Image: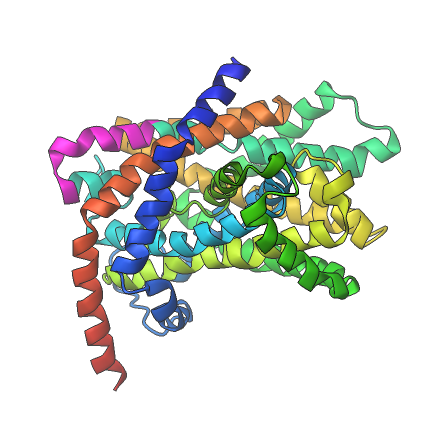
Amino acid sequence: MGEIIIEFSNWIWGTPLLVLLLGGGLYMFVYSGFIPFVGFSHALKVVGGKYDDPNATGDITSLQALSSAVAATVGLGNISGVALAIGMGGPGAIFWMWISAFVGMATKFFTCTLAIMYRGKDSSGHVQGGPMYVIEEGMGKQWKFLSVIFCVAGILGLLVIFQANQLTAVLRAVMLEPFGLDQGMPTRWAIGLILMGLVATVILGGIQRIAKVASRLVPFMVTVYFISVLVILGKNLGQVPEMLWMILRDAFTGDAVLGGAVGQIIIIGARRAAFSNEAGIGTAPMVHGASKTDEPVREGLIAMLGPFIDTIVVCTLTALAIMVTGVWKTGEKDGVLLTLSAFEQGLPGIGKYLLMVSVLVFALSTMFTYSYYGHKCFNYLFGADKADFYNYFYLATLVAGAVTSLSVVMSFVDAMYAVMAFPTMISALYLSPKVREASKDYFQRMKTMDK
């Protein structure tokens, strides 16, 4: 079964999906008038709360929506995903993650603008947002099969088996193995059950509690991680320009790995970027669709900051820390353990504990937010009265993630992400003229308002 999952994942992440994600995103990047650049400063003002309307429709503020989305995206994809990208594709894979991120900013702008433009209602009459509602409300009932495909893949792909797997690996490596306390599989089961209890206390309180916890955890976890990585880079400052040049050179030569297979490096970079920042997958529109706003374009601009924070800033710092310490040539290739080697080398004695705290908070915040995504998919398919059953299924799979092998876990999540991307990108491209019209109108009104 594991081999079948890995083979399916490799097949679906072939040329058609890369053309859809990167090609579709590039089209939106140009069609929007290069919105990631021209709208960036305005997006920062919006996040600062300058235009908040407490009486607008929705459940949470735009800042809480961004915090929740960033809690889901700035997570183990930035720690483990970058390590996997370098381990599998060499430093050049990071360049293709950057390209995917700028393209992804445009994709997120379109998909999250549409999430507000075409909000729907669930079976209880509550306002909801996300690609499934965009498809049904914006494209019409005849396209509903795409909504169903998205939600089925979402229920399976938005489980946090990867986060549970990697958090278990770090806790064992840092806290248990050095003291001879790791008992193998029984330890993994125990960690899985403890995680299940911690996550249950938050997610059973709904989106308000998830958003509240995420908006407090995100600044803390980003600060701890940033400072740790910046200290490592500061100690190896002379090597940073050389490493940046290696990333650029290797992106087009593939010298470091894979015998010069540049195409394979692009695929690895795009896959890891998609897992890290989720642009085009359709998760962020679900949480941004719950924002208290009646301005779709404004929400799209806020959402656009996610891939920038996630991939351009955090992933680059992680990659440089792995590269300047040299562990990518000699260290573990198994995801988070490669980053752990970099922290141990760069910050002897304390590094592994700082990474463990970061991983713990990264993983837990992602676990809280992903439950909301899957809950919304379940709600759409089976009705609001049955949606809470999903939470119990979700909690049970945390334990499964803690005891499963990394390659199978990663391939399964990748495959479901790929399936989700097709309905999300098809609907965003189909409705892109609506977003362009709304953008022109919005910026004209903002010019008048700011005078």
**Residue 127 in magenta?**
no
Can residue 75 be seen in the rendering of this structure?
no
Looking at this view, name the residue that lies furthest to the top.
Answer: 1
Magenta span: 138-152
Q: Judge left or right: residue 36 versus residue 55.
A: right
Q: Residue at x 21, y 57 (%)?
A: 435
Q: How are the colours assigned in the image?
A: rainbow
Q: Judge left or right: residue 47 versus residue 273.
A: left
Among the 4 quarters of the image, the one containing residue 55:
bottom left
Q: Position of residue 127 (x, y in %)?
A: 23, 46
Question: Which quadrant of the figure contains the C terminus?
Answer: bottom left
Q: Position of residue 363 (x, y in %)?
A: 58, 42
Q: Residue at x 12, y 34 (%)?
A: 141
Q: Residue at x 33, y 69 (%)?
A: 52
**Residue 140 in magenta?**
yes
Q: Residue at x 69, y 35 (%)?
A: 333
